[in-house]
Image (cartoon, helix red, strand yellow):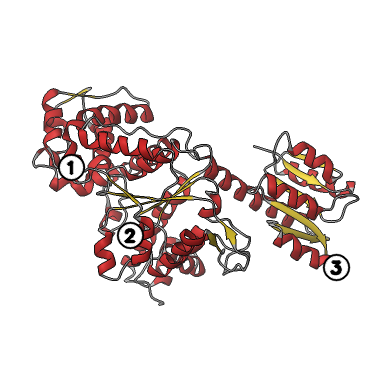
Amino acid sequence: MKPIWIVDDDASIRWVLEKALARENLATRSFSNAPDALAALELETPQVLVSDIRMPGESGLELLQAVKEKCPGLPVIIITAYSDLDSAVAAFQGGAFEYLAKPFDIDKAVALIRRAQDESLRETSVEAGPADTPEILGQAPAMQEVFRAIGRLSQSNVTVLITGESGTGKELVARALHKHSPRASQPFIALNTAAIPKDLLESELFGHERGAFTGAQATRRGRFEQAENGTLFLDEIGDMPFDLQTRLLRVLSDGHFYRVGGHQPLKANVRVITATHQNLELRVREGMFREDLYHRLNVIRLRLPSLRERREDIPILTRHFLVQSARQLGVETKRMSEAAMAFLSSLELPGNVRQLENLCNWITVMAPGQTVEVKDLPPELAHGSGGGWDTVAQAPLELPMSSVASQAMAPARNGDWIDMLEMQAARMLSAGELEVMDVLGRQFESALIKTALKYTHGRKNDAAVRLGIGRNTITRKIAELGIGGAKDD
């Protein structure tokens, strides 16, 4: 991990912070002035920078400005005196993460640096993106048309709307459009607008200023800022709340936006690609989607075919997913018999490519032999045409805790959901998805709280007791996760 940089002309301040951070096993590098720190910044970057505001020569504010120009995502903590509050305000306006007021409590200082470090790691993981774009496979004529469209759009910055059923690979196409564009070296940021609670989506998109709402302890960059000079992919755009559609339209119209709680307009140089499985024209007629935003997004429309329209691709996709799944789990790759492959190719597979991928994960774990026959497939699948198994196959790795009955799972199956969780994490990581811990953690917490609320008939205080958490904690979690049906005892 990168070191924490300390910039202060006071040797005693540097010494105290060095010793305190060393006790936390955090590496440090110290500088007595701003020019030395800026010179070092040409060769490497820290995880967090802590700087005094008043130093001989260049001040901490000048250092902050220079650092933000070079490394906008680097958290900078400014050390200031109580009599220096005007400078503290200027520090925040310049993009400081937080400030330490002299004399400061060393434990609080370390805690603040830890928080800045966590923010720095989160920013790094978002901006780094996946190392490799997942493959888009397909020999069917319908997919060849998609490949040709990606080629024609590769050197364009035009807005693209990707449509198609769930599970057809819309994000993979968005990543391919980015990978082959002039913005390929810049960030690709993906956000599923349907997966974020309405109250948090605005902050997630546009960021927020410190103190904008309860819990906003520091300024945070939103997805538009994280995608600067790159590509922002907004999945399930048809589910975006109506009031936020207005804000998105404004960004697409004039390229400017405001953070939540902010008053300074920010310029966005971002290519926007959107996707939906819904009929946006129908949503417009129903008054659920803004017509002017629809026309802004629908500049170029790229429709992805369902798997039913490209059955000849099922064998190649199946072999690819079996190899991928085996590699993730460190086992030998399973092979499909001719009869089993022919059977798979005849299925409807309403979950499309995602369903097929999850089926291959199931086969890798559950099929008894190396050569898979029809009888080795899931019984529900083998007994029908896929329709009875679609809900399992489309999302077989969800934590099975969303109902009261799942709490009474037999002991022999207690490990099943852990295996499924590990597979889901492996799949997300191999696909280059970001914030995996946060996504799965939210699903886990939501499942636990919903189950507890069912046990207590919606009484959240009783649910908190059963879960072993505080009343304030469950109230906050219910709000953050958008869980309905809770009531005070």
* Gap in angstroms between the C-alphas marked 2 and 1: 23 Å
Position of 372 with respect to 439 (left or right) is: left
* Quadrant including the N terminus: top right
Seen as rendered, the residue at the extreme right is 56
* Gap in angstroms between the C-alphas marked 1 and 3: 68 Å
| Callout 2 touching callout 3 (CB < 8 Å) | no
Q: What secondary structure is marked by label 2?
A: helix
Where is residue 363? Give x, y as percent. Answer: 24, 32
Residue at 56% in and 64% down? 258
Q: Residues within 10 Å of mark 3 (few under 14, many from 20)?
A: few
Q: Nearer the viewer, mark 2 or mark 3?
A: 2
Q: What secondary structure is marked by label 1?
A: loop
Q: Which residue is mark 2?
A: 238
- Residue situated in front as seen by the camera: 216 or 416: 216
Picture quadrant of residue 312 = top left
Q: Which residue is mark 1?
A: 349
| Callout 2 touching callout 1 (CB < 8 Å) | no
Rendered position, 86 above or below 390: below
Residue at 43% in and 66% down? 244
Name which residue type carries label 3: Ser
Q: Residues within 10 Å of mark 2 (few under 14, many from 20)?
A: many
* Gap in angstroms between the C-alphas marked 2 and 3: 51 Å
Seen as rendered, the residue at the extreme left is 383
Where is residue 455? Give x, y as percent. Answer: 32, 66
Dot 2 or dot 1: first in sequence order is: 2
Number of numbered markers: 3
Name which residue type carries label 1: Leu
Can residue 128 be seen here? The reply is yes
Where is residue 387? Give x, y as percent. Answer: 13, 47
Position of 27 with respect to 384 (left or right) is: right
Disc on res. 83: 3
Dot 2 or dot 3: first in sequence order is: 3
